[in-house]
Amino acid sequence: MKNIELFKKVGSFAENKDIDRDVRIEEIIPAIENSQNVIIDFNNIDAVTQSFIHALISDLIRRYGNEVLDKISFKSCNKNVQKIIMIVTDYMQEGA
């Protein structure tokens, strides 16, 4: 199980796609390829941009298919963060 605490990396407003890319490449992809489940912890994050979430998970869905979402959990999300995650995952699943 790989636990990723985003607040330590992005602060309370997650918008930086460069940091996002690094998290995806250096932490999420290696965990998925090693058959680990991933917890992305949004504790203390007040808001995220849609482009941040898109950059975080869209490549994963394209690369591994919709099934990759079974290996990823989104933890401690407020209602706004939940809504954006749902928008992005729904959009990506329609296109996959």
Image (tube, rainbow, N blue to C red):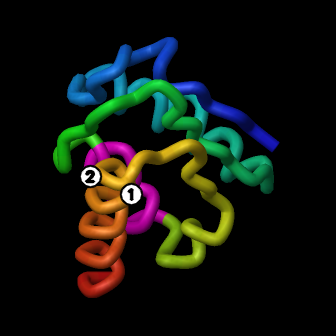
Say which label, 2 or 1, has the lower sequence index.
2
Q: Name the residue at 25% across, 68% down.
A: 87
Residue 22 position, x and y percent, is: 42, 25
Spatial CA distance of label 2 from label 1 is 13 Å
- Amino acid type, mark 2: His
**Residue that label 1 marks:** 82
- Between residue 10 and residue 33, name the one nearer to us: 10
Identity of the residue drawn at 55% across and 68% down:
69
Residue 59: within the magenta? Answer: yes
Image position of 51 with respect to 71: above or below: above
Q: Quadrant of the N terminus?
A: top right
User: Which residue is found at the position 23% from the left and 23% from the top?
Assistant: 16
Q: Position of residue 46 (x, y in %)?
A: 33, 31
For residue 91, say whether it is visible: yes
Asked whether, in this view, residue 55 is left or right of residue 31, the answer is left
- Residue 40 against residue 58 in the figure, above or below: above
State yes or no: discs 2 and 1 in contact (Cβ < 8 Å): no
Q: Nearer the viewer, mark 2 or mark 1?
A: 1
User: Disc number at residue 54?
Assistant: 2
Q: Is residue 65 left or right of residue 32?
A: left
Q: Amino acid at mark 1?
A: Gln
Is 78 on the left or on the right of 32, as rendered? left
User: Where residue 17 sits: x, y (%)?
Assistant: 24, 29
